[in-house]
Structures are given as structure tokens and as C-alpha cells.
Image: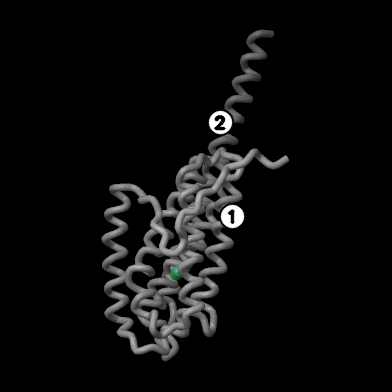
Amino acid sequence: MAKKAKAASGRSSAKKTRAKSVKKASASKGRTKATAKRRANGRRANGADRAPSRGRDPAAIALLKQDHRTVEALFEEFEEATSPTDKRNIAREICLELTIHTMIEEELFYPAVKDAIDEETYGEALVEHDGAKVLIAEIMDANPRDEFYDARVKVLSEMIKHHVKEEEQPGGMFAQARRGDIDFDDLGERLEQRKDDLKRTLKRSGIPAPETRTLHGAELRYGDPVG
Ligand SMILES: [Fe+2]
Ligand SMILES: [Fe+2]
């Protein structure tokens, strides 16, 4: 009887292990699929999959669009993730990518195109960056098991989606910038160089506390949970 029970428990633990490894395999398959999609999106945004055309993005804009596609795919990857470890890793990747992207835009791209774009577009873009930085700081400081972790990442993705639309849409920041007298090849090279440097540095040192440009860190009070 005891033997039977043992055999049964052995079978059920073998079943559990199999289920676990199937789950693990499909989770990692999911990540692989999402990573492949991210790479393909990156190539497309860069123009590598397109025939040359007169409407092709200048180098600097192609690089920034490629960053946008990378982050969008990472957000999709986060939505599919189930384990706290995967969620933490993907969220950190999102925060790293966004930190580098906002830094190169604020240090190089925005100043270079400032005179070619309208004041409203410029101001809103910087405030949107700062709003995203608040959530990035919160996510970096949180645990994937926290109650509002997924909600923070989701809201960050929505904020970024809106911001990317404002940059890429017809008449948006990139379209306005293209009408200016800007050496996009040189700017593209400088963006790429700074991006590589930051990637190397931040991978070693970790993601720094975000630096805001328009929000002054007004004090917030953390209240009791709702409900
Ligand atoms: Fe951008
Ligand atoms: Fe931006």
C-alpha cells in the first residue's frame, strides 16, 4: 500500500516536473519568439528590410525609430511573461533601453532639432520624458510581486506609446525636424556613438536615478491603500 502511494507520488512528481519543464520551454520559446520579433522590428525600422527609397528616414531618425520598435517589443514580451524573474529581467531591460533613449534624445537629438520644431511639441516631449522617468524609477525600485508592479509597467507602456506617436506621426516631431537644416548623418553617428558608450557604461554600473528636465520633484505623500 505504502509502495503504491510512493509510486503514485513518484508519478505525480514526475508529471509535475514534466509540466514545469514544458511550461519553462514554452516560456523561453515565447521569449525567443518575442526577441526574434524585436530584432526583425529593429531591422525594419532601420530600413534594412526595405528597398532604398526617397522617403527613407535619415540616419538619426532611423536609429530613434529602431529604439522605439525595440521597446515596443519588450513591452509585448513583458505582457506574455509569467514568472517574477522574467518580469523583473524584461522590466529592467525596458528601463535600460528607455533611459538610454531619453538620454541620447535629450543630450543630442532634441537640441539639434529644437529650432526646426514648434515650442509646444518640444515642451510636451520633455514633460512626457520626465513623466516616464518617474515610473521608471518606481519600477526599478519595486519587486515584481508587488501589487501594482504590472500596472506600473502597463501604464509606462501606454505613456511611451503616446510619446512615440507624437514623435513619429505625420506633422509630429520627426516630420518637423526633417524640414529643418540638419545634418542627420552626422547626428546619427553621434547618437550611435553615445548610445554605445552608455550601453557599455550602464551595463557595468547599473541604471542611474533618472534626471528630470522639467519636473522639479514636488513632494508626494504616499497614502493608505485604496479599498
Ligand atoms: Fe523617441
Ligand atoms: Fe522622446
- Residue that appears at 56% across and 44% down: 221
The N terminus: image quadrant: top right
- Residue that appears at 61% across and 30% down: 15
Secondary structure under badge 2? helix
Specify the amino acid type for callout 2.
Answer: Thr
Q: Residue 27 carries which label?
A: none
Can residue 50 be seen? yes
Farthest residue toward the top? 2
User: Which percent across, then down, holds residue 199?
Assistant: 31, 57
- Residue that appears at 30% across and 81% down: 185
Q: Which mark is residue 154?
A: 1
Front one among 204 and 162: 162
User: Which percent across, then down, holds residue 133?
Assistant: 46, 57
Q: How is the image coloured?
A: one colour
Front one among 154 and 36: 154
Farthest residue toward the right? 227
Q: Mark 2 points at which residue?
A: 17
